[in-house]
Image: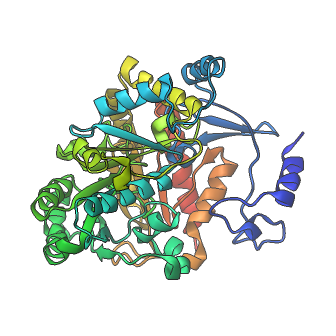
C-alpha cells in the first residue's frame, strides 16, 4: 500500500469537506494543484503517510487534537469503555460516562451553567443553543422575541441555523435564500484599530455599535451569539476581553441571552480553560465541542442555567418540553474520551505549560512582524495568526484568486509541516504536546513558505 494507490481509490469515491475537488485532480493548474495526503498513522504532533513521510500537525487536525495523536491515556480509556458499553439511547436512559462528564462540565465551566445537553458536533450545539433561547422566551410568553444578533466576520457552523448567525460570505452567500434573517453588528476585530490604539481601547470603542443594536432591537431579540476573543474561521481575528464584559452587562440590561460559542476557543486554547474566564463572565449558554474529546470522537455539549431549564420543566400536557434529539446523544465512547481529556487537564499542569508554549511561539514568530508582506502578527494564547498582504503600509490585500496561502500550504507539506491557511492568513494552532524544537520548525517552514509565496 502506498500514497498513490490510496489517492486513486479515494478520488473514485470520496467527496472531501471544504474542498474544491478539482484541485486534487492531476489535471488541475499549477496554481490550484492541491496534493491529497493519505495518512496511515499518528503519534504525538506527527502524522505519517503511506510512503513514510511525516507531517507536523500545526493545526491540530482542524483544531480538535489537544494532547497528540494516539494519546495513551485516551486510548486506554476508550479500550476500557469498549468492554462495558459502546452506546445507549439517552432518551429515558442514562449511563455513567454521560453523567460523570455532565457533572464535570458543570464543575469546570463558568458559574451558573448548571445543566448539560449533549449533541454530536459544534454546529449542532449552536443549533441547540439558538433553539433553547428562542423556546425559553416562547415558554415565558414573550413570543415576539424571534431574532438573533451576531457579529460581522463571525462563524458558528454550517447547518442552516448556525450558518444564518454566521457572517463569513464564503460559506454563507450561496445559501442565503434558505436562511433566517439576523441582525449583524460591526465587531471589535482589532485588526482595524488605529495606529497606536490598544486592543482594549478599540474593543471598548466598537462596543458602542452593539449597545445601539441592543437598545433598538432588544424587544425582538432572543440572544447575542459570539465567539469569545477569537473569530477563528474569520481569519483568526482577535479582540480584547473587555468586549465580553461590556456585552454581558448589556445583555443583562436589555434582557437578552448571551450565547458563547467556545467550540474552537475552549479547553485551554486562549490561555485559560475557557475564553470567557478572561472577562470573568458567565454566558447564558456555552457551546463546546472540538477539543472536548481531545480530537478522538464527535461530541458536543451545551451548558445553560437552571433558570433556562425551569422554563421547560412542566406537565407534559402543556407541551413546553425541549424536543430535540440526536441518535448518538451522550455516546458512551465520546463521553469517556472527553473524561480522559479533562483528566489530563487535572493531572498535568496544562494551562501553565500552555502559557510557556505560547511564549515560545511568540518568540518564534517575532521576525514575521518586520516582513514587508505581513500586515500583522497576532496571538491569543496558543493561537498565532500571520496576515499576508500585498502592501504592508496600506494593508492592501492580495487578490483572493491568487491563493497565496495555498502556496505556503504546499511548500509546508514538502517540508513536513501541515499548515492549512485561512485565505492569506497563516496560523498556528498546534496540539499542547508540541515542544520547542517543533515550534521552531513550524515557524521556520512558515517563514520560508511565505518568502516563496510573495516572491513575484
Give x and y (percent) for residue 269: 38, 42
Q: Above or below — where is 437 with respect to 418?
A: above
From where the camera sits, is residue 386 visible? Answer: yes
Q: Nearer the viewer, residue 275 or 114?
A: 114
Q: Which of the image's four quarters has the N terminus?
A: top right
Residue under the point 53% across and 35% down: 438
Q: Above or below — where is 75 with respect to 299?
A: above
Q: Which of the image's four quarters has the C terminus?
A: bottom right
Q: Nearer the viewer, residue 133 or 253?
A: 133
Residue under the point 57% across and 51% down: 419
Of all residues shown, which one is farthest toward the front? 317
* Count of marks, rendered view: 0
Residue under the point 62% across and 23% down: 85
**Location of residue 212 (image quadrant):** bottom left
Residue under the point 58% across and 45% down: 61
Of all residues shown, which one is farthest toward the left? 253
Q: Above or below — where is 445 with respect to 372?
A: above
From where the camera sits, is residue 320 visible? Answer: no
Give x and y (percent) for residue 69: 60, 32
Residue 389 in the figure: left or right of residue 39: left
Residue 430 in the figure: left or right of residue 356: right
Give x and y (percent) for residue 306: 24, 41
Residue 367 in the figure: left or right of residue 418: left
Give x and y (percent) for residue 292: 46, 37
Residue 419 in the figure: left or right of residue 137: right
Q: Nearer the viewer, residue 307 or 340?
A: 307
Q: How is the image coloured?
A: rainbow
Of all residues shown, which one is farthest toward the bottom? 177
Amino acid at each position: 500500500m502506498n500514497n498513490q494507490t490510496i489517492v486513486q481509490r479515494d478520488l473514485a469515491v470520496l467527496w472531501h469537506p471544504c474542498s474544491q475537488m478539482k484541485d486534487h485532480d492531476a489535471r488541475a493548474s499549477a496554481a490550484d494543484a492541491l496534493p491529497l495526503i493519505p495518512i496511515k498513522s499518528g503519534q504525538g504532533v506527527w502524522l505519517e503517510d503511506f510512503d513514510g513521510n511525516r507531517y507536523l500537525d500545526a493545526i491540530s487536525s482542524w483544531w480538535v487534537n489537544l494532547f497528540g495523536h494516539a494519546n495513551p491515556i485516551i486510548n486506554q480509556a476508550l479500550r476500557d469503555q469498549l468492554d462495558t458499553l459502546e452506546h445507549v439511547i439517552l432518551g429515558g436512559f442514562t449511563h455513567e460516562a454521560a453523567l460523570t462528564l455532565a457533572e464535570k462540565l458543570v464543575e469546570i465551566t463558568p458559574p451558573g451553567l448548571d445543566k448539560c445537553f449533549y449533541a454530536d458536533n459544534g454546529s449542532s450545539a449552536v443549533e441547540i443553543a439558538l433553539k433553547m433561547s428562542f423556546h425559553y422566551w416562547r415558554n415565558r410568553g414573550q413570543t415576539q422575541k424571534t431574532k438573533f444578533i451576531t457579529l460581522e466576520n463571525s462563524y458558528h457552523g454550517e447547518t442552516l441555523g448556525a450558518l444564518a448567525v454566521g457572517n463569513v460570505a464564503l460559506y454563507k452567500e450561496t445559501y442565503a435564500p434558505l436562511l433566517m434573517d439576523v441582525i449583524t453588528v460591526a465587531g471589535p476585530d482589532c485588526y482595524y484599530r488605529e495606529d497606536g490604539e490598544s486592543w482594549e481601547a478599540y474593543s471598548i470603542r466598537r462596543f458602542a455599535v452593539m449597545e445601539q443594536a441592543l437598545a433598538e432591537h432588544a424587544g425582538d431579540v432572543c440572544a447575542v451569539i459570539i465567539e469569545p476573543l477569537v473569530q477563528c474561521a474569520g481569519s483568526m481575528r482577535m479582540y480584547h476581553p473587555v468586549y465580553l464584559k461590556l456585552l454581558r452587562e448589556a445583555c443583562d440590561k436589555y434582557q437578552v441571552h448571551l450565547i458563547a460559542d467556545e467550540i474552537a476557543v475552549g479547553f485551554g486554547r486562549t490561555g485559560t480553560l475557557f475564553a470567557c474566564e478572561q472577562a470573568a463572565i458567565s454566558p447564558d449558554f456555552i457551546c463546546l465541542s472540538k477539543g472536548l474529546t481531545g480530537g478522538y470522537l464527535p461530541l458536543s455539549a451545551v451548558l445553560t442555567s437552571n433558570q433556562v431549564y425551569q422554563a421547560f420543566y412542566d406537565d407534559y400536557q402543556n407541551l413546553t418540553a425541549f424536543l430535540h434529539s440526536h441518535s448518538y446523544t451522550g455516546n458512551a465512547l465520546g463521553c469517556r474520551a472527553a473524561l480522559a481529556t479533562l483528566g489530563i487537564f487535572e493531572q498535568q499542569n496544562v494551562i501553565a505549560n500552555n502559557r510557556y508554549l505560547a511564549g515560545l511561539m511568540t518568540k518564534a514568530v517575532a521576525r514575521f512582524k518586520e516582513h514587508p508582506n505581513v500586515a500583522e502578527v497576532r496571538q491569543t494564547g496558543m493561537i498565532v495568526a500571520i496576515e499576508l498582504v500585498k502592501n504592508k503600509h496600506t494593508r492592501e490585500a492580495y487578490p483572493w484568486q491568487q491563493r497565496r496561502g495555498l502556496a505556503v500550504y504546499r511548500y509546508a507539506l514538502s517540508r513536513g509541516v501541515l499548515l492549512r491557511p485561512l485565505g492569506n492568513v497563516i496560523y498556528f494552532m498546534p496540539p499542547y504536546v508540541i515542544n520547542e524544537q517543533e515550534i521552531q520548525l513550524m515557524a521556520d517552514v512558515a517563514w520560508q513558505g511565505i518568502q516563496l509565496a510573495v516572491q513575484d
